[in-house]
Every structure is written in structure tokens, then in C-alpha cells.
Amino acid sequence: MNPHRLARSGSLTFAFVVTGAVLAFTATLVVSNASGAAAAGQFFQVVALLAIATTLSTFGADTGLVRAVPALTARGRAGGIPEVLRIAGKPVLVLATAVAGTTALAVAVPGLVPVPAEVRSAVLLATPFLVLGAAMNLAFGALRGLHRVPTFSFLQNVLLPSLRVLAVVAVVALGGGLLSLTAAWTVPVLVVAVVAVALVRRAVTAPADPAAAPEEVRERSRAFWSFASARGVTAVVEALLEWLDVLLVAFFLGPAAAGVYGVVNRCIRVGTMLDHTARIVTGPSISAALAVGDVATARSVFTRTTAVLVAGAWPFYLTLIVFGPAVLSFFGEGFDAGYPALLVIASAMLLAVSAGGVQSLLLMAGRSRWQLLNKSAALAVAVALNLWLIPQWGLVGAATAWAASVLTDTGLALFQSVRLLGIAPRWSVVGAIALTAAAVAGGGGLLVRALLGAGTTGLLVHAGLLGLLVGGAVAVLVVRRRGDTRARLSAEEATAGRGRTVVTMNLHK
């Protein structure tokens, strides 16, 4: 994908991801305000268990498709895509069925899973949708690999959360409980899975290669799952890293504390969606570049990704640091008690996001096992610190464990990228952008807070000023890009004109 198409795809995908973040934020607002901290904590436990089970069911096959499909296309072998879809799909559907059955049996036995009876009933209701969730994730991976990134992003970040928000609002309006909320969260997966699979079938246009010999098929399957299985274990570890602290907070401190901490978790995850955008947009391009040995292009994409991540995420996290109590107050009474935890995690994320799209780089370079080791080390840190610190420090202990695990993972991945792969962004560019963001978002936020206070008024004024600055910066970039495009087209026309003149002169000789 050329830089102009990559920029267009990235812009559209970012718009969809922002929409998804707003919708996810809205769903959390509705649940927390309507149900209170304790009921919200139970809902977050259900979402956590379902997220972990769905990730286990997919087992990295979606990322395997993101890597394998563009590599086949780059090598001129698009006819092999149907086969790699079969190699990915059959084992995943079998595994998802097994996970769904095991989960249903586990939650059906009282006391086997340390969660309240209401949570067990809700998870039992949702287990049939694990197979659909795995199929949906596979289709998402195929769309990303086929460079249909905006289409994938629309399905994941607009259609799915929109259906969920509408369903959740309806349930709250009708006075439904946890079971109804769980149904509202899971049933939209059916709709999106059907749409995604249909779009993949339409996108695969190249005629399939002739049937390969059984030995060759086994070798291709072995190569695919050698990468995907390591990524699958890593993805499960990532899901545990994302949700383990919520479950442990509920276990040690009760559902109300889990509700407060779950809201903190969701606020921070809004910022990580920019990193998610970078992964889904740049992953296929990095894979295609590295597949043909074009390290320079991979390094260029990595540098641009890091710059965009710092420019976008630093203002967000700095806003949370300065106006965190006002942000948390939107979720209802008592949720502002999570501000100390929010402060710890947001500060750590400033450092983590400065490493750029290093996770995507490792994956697309085929170093899924490196990433597995990194995530495993981070999970070990998270488990040890959560078990030690939550009973002593409460929510701040959980936040400290999360921050330590994030920095462990990011530090290891950055070392491997720079020292072992030899691919690093231009740190001077990253540093300049970070300093600018700190001055504008951090310094400006502190000034607004000093003048208007740390409440809702100060937050809204600060957000409005940031919006104007971002809008102005985007407008300048668009104008410059259009000018560059016009200059490039003029140069091409001039070159073509000189070529026609030479041909005409030769014909008259």
C-alpha cells in the first residue's frame, strides 16, 4: 500500500476507532449510571470472562491471517488465500466449540469458578456466542489481510458497538438486570459475524490454486499454526493482562470496587484504541514490506506510526491526569474514588505509547514467540503484584500492578525491535512531538485548571481548546498534502509532456 492510500486508510480507520471509543464510553456510562458501582462490577466480570474465552477460542488465527494473506499477495500468490482461510477456520471453530462447552460446564458447577451466582448465570447464557465471536474474529483478520482495513474497522468499531449501545439502552429503559444486559452485549455478535463472513467471501476474488498434495497442505498448515499458535497464547495472555485485575479486585474488594476500577480500566482503554488503529492499519504494510526484505519501508512506517501515536495519545492521557475526577464523575456517584488509580496508570501509559507500534512490528516480523515471552513476563509481574498490592493498597495496588506489567512488556519489545531487529523510529521526531504535547495538553490543562478549576467546566474548556488545536493542525496537514499532490501531478504532467515532445521530434527527423 502506497503512503497516500495508507494515509487515507488510516484517517478513515481512525475516525471509526474514535466512534467506537465514544460508543464504548457511552455503553459504560449507561450501565454505571443506571445500575450503580456494584451492578456495574458484576457486568464487567461477565465481559472479562467472555473476552478471555473468545480470545482463547480464536487462538491467534486472526493475526495469522493478517500476516499470511498480504504476504501471499505480495509474492503474487493470491490464489492461495482460500486455502489459508480453510487452514485457519476449521481448527478455530472446533476449538471455539470446545471452549464454549467447557465454559458452560465450569460455570454450571457452583463454587468451581469464584464468581457470584448472577455472574455464572450470565456467562452460561453467553457461551453459545463464543463460536460466533471466533468466526467474527477470523473474518476480521481476513479483511485486514486483504487490505479492507476501513471495512473491518467499521464493523468492529461502529456497527458492533452501535448495536450494543442500542440494546443496552433498551434493556436499561425496560429495567432489565444482568442477564438482559449480557444478552444485549452478545446478540449483536451474531449480526456482525454474518456480515463480516459475507464481506470476506466477496473480497476474495482471485481464483483458488489447484488442490495441493496432502503433504504440502500439512506443511502449509504447520507453518501457519507455528506462528498463529504462539500468537494465540500471547493473545490469551493479553486478555488476562487486560481483565485479570478487574477480576482480582472483585475477588478481594467486592463488586462495587470492581465497578469503580472497571470504569478506570475503560477510560484508559479509550487511549489504547489509537495504538489499536496503528496495528490494524500498518500491520499488513509492514508484513508485505518485510516479506520482500524491504526493511527501509518497514522502518518508515514504524516511524510514522510512533509519531502519530505520541501526538494523539499524549494529550488524552495528560487530560486524564489533570481532569481525572471530572471525567470519572460522569459515570455516577462514587466513581471519582478511582482517580488515584487513574493517575498511576495514565502516567505509565505516557511512557508505553512512546514506543510506537512496536507490538505490530514484532508480529509482522514473524517474532510472535518473542512477544509471547514478553507478555508472559508482564503477566507474571501483574499476577505477583496484584496478589501482593491489592489487599494492601486497594485500587492503587491494582493500578500499580497494571502499570508495572505494561512497562515490562513495552520495554522488552522495544529492546528487541531496536537491538535485535535493528528497526527504531527517529527519536528526535518522537521527542519533539512529546514535548509539544506536554506543553500544549499538560501545561495548557494546568493553566485552565488553575483558572476554572478541576471540575466539568474546566474539562470542557480544555477539551474544546484541544479540539480547536487538533482541527487546525489537521487542516494544515490536509492543505500541505493537497499542495504536495498538485505539485507531484504537475511534475508528472511536465515529464510526460517532455516525453511527448521528444517522441514528436524523433518522428519528424
Image (tube, helix red, strand yellow):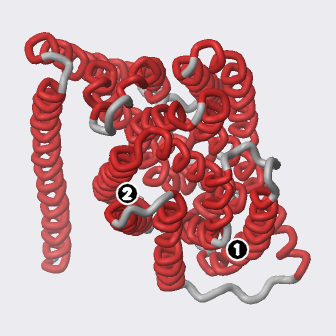
Count of number-bearing discs: 2
Instruction: Quarter of the image for the C terminus: give it.
Output: bottom left
Query: Foreground: 272 or 47?
Result: 47
User: Which residue has dot 2 on it?
Assistant: 2
Where residue 35 appears, as percent x and y from the top left, is 41, 48
Q: Please name the amino acid that badge 1 sits on.
A: Gly
User: Which residue has dot 1 on it?
Assistant: 89
Quarter occupied by residue 102: bottom right
Residue that appears at 70% across and 47% down: 236
Tag 2 and tag 1, C-beta contact below 8 Å: no
Residue that appears at 53% across and 62% down: 182
Q: In the figure, 173 relative to 238: above or below?
A: below
Mark 2, mark 1: which one is toward the viewer? 1
Where residue 73 appears, as percent x and y from the top left, is 56, 69
- Measure the alpha-carbon separation of dots 2 and 1: 30 Å
- Taking the image as shown, residue 37 lies to the left or right of residue 294, namely left
Disc on the earlier residue, 2 or 1: 2
Residue that appears at 46% across and 66% down: 184
- Taking the image as shown, residue 440 lies to the left or right of residue 4, namely left
Q: Which residue, as the protein is rendered here, is positioned at the far top?
A: 450
Q: Which mark is residue 448?
A: none
Where residue 243 appears, as percent x and y from the top left, is 60, 40
- Taking the image as shown, residue 230 lies to the left or right of residue 160, namely right
Query: Foreground: 199 or 491?
Result: 199
Q: Please name the amino acid that badge 2 sits on.
A: Asn
Query: Foreground: 461 or 175?
Result: 175
Asked if residue 496 shows in the view, the reply is: yes
Label 1 environment density (alpha carbons within 10 Å; few <14, some 14–19, many ≥20): some
Instruction: Quarter of the image for the N terminus: give it.
Output: bottom left
Asked which secondary structure carries label 2, the reply is loop
Where residue 488 appears, as percent x and y from the top left, is 18, 54
